[in-house]
Amino acid sequence: MDSWDSYGREGGLYRRLRDACAADWAAYTWHPFVQRLSNGTLRLSGFRHYLVQDYLFLIHFARAKALAVVKGESLEAMRGKAAAVLAILDETKLHLKYCAEWGLDEPAVIATPETMETVSYTRWVMDRGMHGDILDLEVALAPCTVGYGEVALRVMADPARTPAYQNWTDTYASADYQAMARAAAARLDALGDSHGGEARFATLARDFGMAARLEARSWQQGHEVA
């Protein structure tokens, strides 16, 4: 079994969603952008474009996590999500420093408008959270959190991998990030048990697949940059 196949438990909601959306999931986690990032052929301009939009995405990701505090099913869950909000806000500062390492000026990054891909993805996540419950929101968020963990492991396992973008891969292949990805998959399993995941599976799978496709579109914009 590949290491990324161990996220979640056998028969749990996360693995069932991933299996139900296998084609969309594969198109996301081994997108041509990821393959070129792995083998070093990704253009620097494309990587820089991705980094800027990822910074803008993080801002909305923090808002979605804040909504998860409101939607949280318990005080313990609310505390966990509140801590996650603070962690993401701190990450935005680190992300700007990382952008600077790749020649991106902080004021220019902040002033860059969101692309349509970034707008559509982030507002869709918020819409699912606003109109659904905590399970709907967590399903919309999981392809980002868990998916990046899988992407990093796929890159690490790629025989064509080069060190060109290794520092990016190292971030998501790290023990800390992998632990967070596994915790997110386990949380989906638990919420599936407590919030009627079986009865709602068709709708949840639809949303999981949509999130995977939106992630793939985020990669695509960097893939297409000249």
Image (cartoon, rainbow, N blue to C red):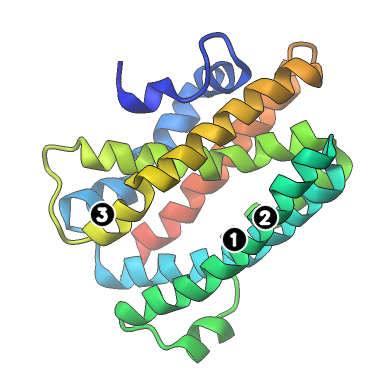
Q: Residue furthest top?
A: 11
- For mark 3, what is the residue? 37
Q: Amino acid at mark 3?
A: Leu
Q: Mark 2: few, some, or many residues within 10 Å (few <14, many ≥20)?
A: some
Q: Secondary structure at mark 2?
A: helix
- For mark 1, what is the residue? 87
Q: Earlier in the sequence, mark 2 or mark 3?
A: 3
Closer-to-camera residue (39/144): 144
Q: Residue at x 46, y 38 (%)?
A: 179
Q: Secondary structure at mark 1?
A: helix
Residue 24 sits above or below residue 104 on the image: above
- For mark 2, what is the residue? 83
Whether residue 129 is visible here, answered yes or no, is: yes
Image-based side of 169 in relation to 131, left or right? left
Q: Residue at x 22, y 57 (%)?
A: 166
CA gap, disc 2 and disc 1? 6 Å
Q: Amino acid at mark 1?
A: Ala
Question: Looking at the rendering, in which quadrant would you find the C terminus?
Answer: bottom left
Residue 90 sits above or below residue 168 on the image: below
Residue 210 badge: none
Q: Quadrant of residue 202?
A: top right
Closer-to-camera residue (25/173): 173
CA gap, disc 2 and disc 3? 31 Å
Q: Nearer the viewer, mark 3 or mark 1?
A: 1
Discs 2, 1 touching: Cβ within 8 Å? yes
Discs 2, 3 touching: Cβ within 8 Å? no
Q: Amino acid at mark 2?
A: Ala
